[in-house]
Image (cartoon, helix red, strand yellow):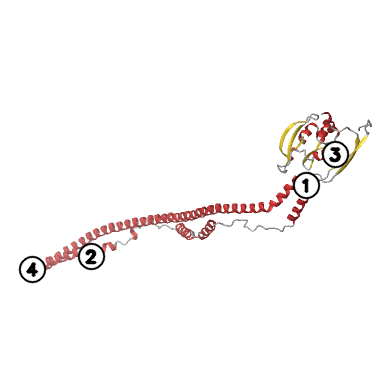
Amino acid sequence: MGGGSPAPSSQTITNRTELPPWLEDITKENLARADALSNRPYQAYPGQLTAGFSPEQEAAFQFAQAGVGATQPMYNQAYGVTSGVANYTPQQVQAQNFLQGDVSGYMNPYVQNVEQAALSRLEGATKQAVNRIGDQAAAARAFGGSRQGIAEGVALGEAARSAGELSANLRSQAFQQAAQQMQADQNRALQASLANQQAGLSGAGLNLQGGAGLANIAGQYQQARGLDAATLENVGRARQAMAQQQLDEAYARFMEEKNYPVENLNLRLAATSATPYGTTQTQTRPYTAPNSFLTGLGTLGSAASGIASLFSLFSDERAKTDIQKVGKDPESGLDMYAYRYKGDPKSYPKVVGPMAQDIEKKYPEAVREIGGKKTVNLGFGPMRKAFKNG
């Protein structure tokens, strides 16, 4: 544009982005690594993934199995006792009627021991009286006479009368005593039967309590065994959980070591994925004088456009690190920062430029999302004007 030549009415701008040699070498190396990783044979995890039952759990299982049916005999016994009590029939007690008793059994000893002895004594006395009458008759020289016979008859008749009265009196006394004794025995038998009935009822109640107590003991025994088994199971479960955690940690370390080369490759790919690969763009537009801001960055003409296109792909703040504010661009008013891209070694020199987020606030039409990253179109008209007049 020197020598007074008029400015062209239009201009053709060709933006061509090529990989720098160092980035091309890295890309080839990444491709070689990816090829090596894809050809690597499948590597199965050799360790155990699931923790088995712990010794305490095995002991709990065996303990619980050994106790199955252990209380059944006690339950059967309790059931038998309860069934027996349920079918128990109390002793029927009835008072015996006096007329149903045999009083003769009570009178015979009295008649034999008392009445017979009394009659024998009366008979002896009668004989003695008759003998005295005979002696008296003999002494009076009237033995065998009528007077003797009359006297003896009177004596014998009196003796018979006395014997009858004595026998009746003795038998009456014997009957009364026998009746009293039989009634007393019947009362004692009734009391004994009532006592036996009460004893039977009490015994049935005790048996029922014993059966219930036996069933209760069996239940407590079974419950205690269950608690013991649960305690062993809890201890075993804690140990199993610890063993499972150790297995999980071992598997995690195995996967971490196995994926380490892949993660390294992904890191290298991420560091170079934002770099454009050999694209060429040609635009024809009205001629515009070179922007002083781009000139300040050491860019002119098509070279400036190429650098601007490359610069726009790396303008997202999220892709940068070691950021330090260094001032403002006098034309656009944008803050300028010195930074490195994430993944670059610390030995790399810092790059100076704005942030896409700041540009988006002032010129939203100049920023767009590509591949999840903010990019800036520095060739956009308002953007160029902003950098020129900002």
Secondary structure of the residue carrying numbered label 2: helix
Mark nearer the viewer, 4 or 2: 2
Secondary structure of the residue carrying numbered label 4: helix
Q: Is residue 344 above or below residue 136?
A: above
Amino acid at pointer 2: Gln
Q: Which residue is mark 3?
A: 303
Mark nearer the viewer, 3 or 4: 3
Quick one: label 4 or label 1, which is nearer the N terminus?
Answer: 1
Quick one: label 2 or label 3, which is nearer the N terminus?
Answer: 2
Looking at the rendered structure, which numbered label has been put on residue 386? none
Which one is nearer the viewer's eye here, 377 or 232? 377
**Residues under labels 2 and 3: Cα distance?**
163 Å
The answer to whether one can see residue 140 in this image is no
Quick one: label 3 or label 1, which is nearer the N terminus?
Answer: 1
Amino acid at pointer 4: Asp
Q: Which residue is mark 2?
A: 112
Q: Which residue is mark 1?
A: 22
